[in-house]
Structures are given as structure tokens and as C-alpha cells.
Image (cartoon, grey):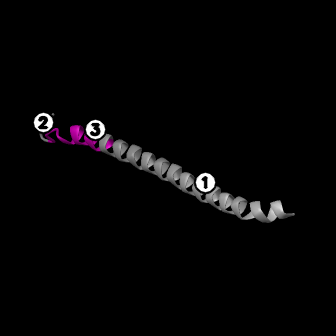
Amino acid sequence: MEYVAVLLPSLVVGLIFWFAMRAIFNADKSERQAEARAQAEAEARAAQLSDGQSTDRRDPDSK
């Protein structure tokens, strides 16, 4: 029983550290995914705008 009393605090601290690190890594992964999604949307929007501007640049009077 002495071994449990000696090892239990270290195990608890280790588990708390493990859960904290897991939460940090999951948050980082989610943030990276959200950033990639936002970047892809911005690139798609920029491409769509550049395509739209190329057709809008035509002179409406010329046929």
C-alpha cells in the first residue's frame, strides 16, 4: 500500500499533463484546419473575382 501512496501523485500529475497536452494538440490541429479552410475560401474568392473582372473589363458599347 505504501507504493500506491508514493506513486499515485506522480500518476495523477502525469495524467493531468497528458490530458492538457492532448487538448493543446487537438486545438492546434483544429486551428490549422480552420486556417486552411479560410485560406482555400479566400483563394477561391480571389480566383472568382479575377475571373469576373476579366469579363467585366469588356466595353459594353463594343459588340
- Which sits earlier in the primary sequence, circle 3 or circle 2? 3
Q: Secondary structure at mark 3?
A: helix
Say which amino acid is labelled 3: Asp
- Marks 3 and 1 sit apart, C-alpha to C-alpha, by 43 Å
Badge count: 3
- In front of the other: label 3 or label 2? 3
In the depicted view, which residue is nearer to us: 48 or 2?
A: 2
Q: Position of residue 18 (x, y in %)?
A: 64, 55
Q: What secondary structure is the stretch in magenta mostly built from?
A: helix
- Which sits earlier in the primary sequence, circle 1 or circle 2? 1
- Marks 1 and 2 sit apart, C-alpha to C-alpha, by 63 Å
Left or right of residue 21: residue 52: left
Residue at left offset 82%, top offset 62%: 4
- Which sits earlier in the primary sequence, circle 3 or circle 1? 1
Say which amino acid is labelled 1: Arg
| Residue under numbered circle 2 | 62
Residue at left offset 45%, top offset 47%: 37
| Residue under numbered circle 3 | 51
Q: Of the numbered discs in the image, which one, if any, rests on residue 22?
A: 1
Residue at left offset 68%, top offset 58%: 15
- In front of the other: label 3 or label 1? 1
Q: 27 above or below 43?
A: below
Q: Position of residue 16 (x, y in %)?
A: 65, 62
Say which amino acid is labelled 2: Ser
Left or right of residue 38: residue 56: left
